[in-house]
Image (cartoon, grey):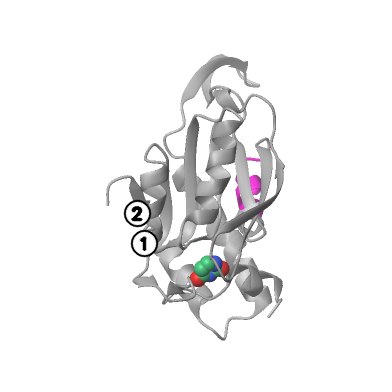
Amino acid sequence: MDGVTVIDHPLVQHKLTIMRKKETSTAGFRRLLREISTLLCYEVTRDLELTMERIETPMMETDAPILEGKKLVFASILRAGNGLLEGMLELVPSARVSHIGVYRDHETLQPVEYYFKAPESLSERLVIVVDPMLATGNSSIAAIDKLKERGAKNIRFLCLLAAPEGILNFQSAHPDVAIFTAAIDSHLNEKGYIMPGLGDAGDRMYGTK
Ligand code: URA
């Protein structure tokens, strides 16, 4: 699929399978999510630009590569996005963080926004939006609408699982935003859950069901 990168690294696929199992505990699910998020972060940042900096090692001066430009922004769609955020911040501790509160009305499946906080200068930063599940796509579309209103221009979207219907919806709203996912599942059910999926990601990571 154009504009979608499936991160098929064997470690990602193995961990994802264990996360999908209904018998995986809350603690296990959370630990795997943290581990998988560092692997996903590695892939979503693979082509970041570098610049050379003059440094001094204990032996001599040399030119060495460092990340170019302003600090990255990780934008977490609450609440499940926070599960991906933690592992990503371990890899990129200097990243700035945006929190976007959007929940899905279970009747209409439409997004309802209740919180938005983002760092300054979004227009000069790469913004990586994180949410484990790209289901209908409505919440992520709403979150990215808001980030764009605040000036963000260079945006990527990272999830664990995506449904084909969600990808189509997302790409018709935001064709400029590349999607990174560990898997594309079969379809959405009538309640908007990804099939075969892993259930409600927020409930599974926080033990709320
Ligand atoms: N959100 C989830 O947590 N799971 C789904 O299957 C769909 C949306």
Q: Residue at x 35, y 50 (%)?
A: 5
Residue 120 is situated, as x and y percent measured from the top left of the image, at: 69, 27
Residue pictured at 53% horizontal, 76% vertical: 199
Q: Is residue 150 above or below residue 97?
A: above
Q: Which mark is residue 122?
A: none
Dot 1: few (<14), some (14–19), or many (≥20) neighbours within 10 Å? Answer: some
Does dot 2 land on a helix, a strand or a loop? helix
- Give SS at disc 1: helix
> Residue 203 magenta-drawn?
no
Q: Residue furthest bottom?
A: 23
Residue 172's x, y, as percent?
Answer: 36, 46
Q: Which residues are magenta?
A: 85-93
Q: Quadrant of residue 75?
A: top right
Three-letter code, disc 1: Glu
- Residue 165 visible within the image: yes
User: Disc 2 marks which amino acid?
Assistant: Leu
Image position, residue 182 (x, y; %): 42, 60
Note whether 62 is above or below 155 in the view shown. Answer: above
| Left or right position of 110 against 188 | right
Label pair 2/1, CB-CB below 8 angstroms: yes
Residue 6 in sight in this render: no
Residue 21 falls left or right of residue 103: left
List the residue tagged with mark 1: 165
Give the answer, above or below, for where 147 lies relative to 108.
above
Q: Could you say which is closer to the camera, residue 95 or residue 54?
A: 95
- Magenta stretch, overall SS: helix
Give the left or right position of residue 92, taking residue 189 as reference: right
Q: Please give the label number shown on residue 168.
A: 2
Q: Is mark 1 within 8 Å of ligand 1?
A: no
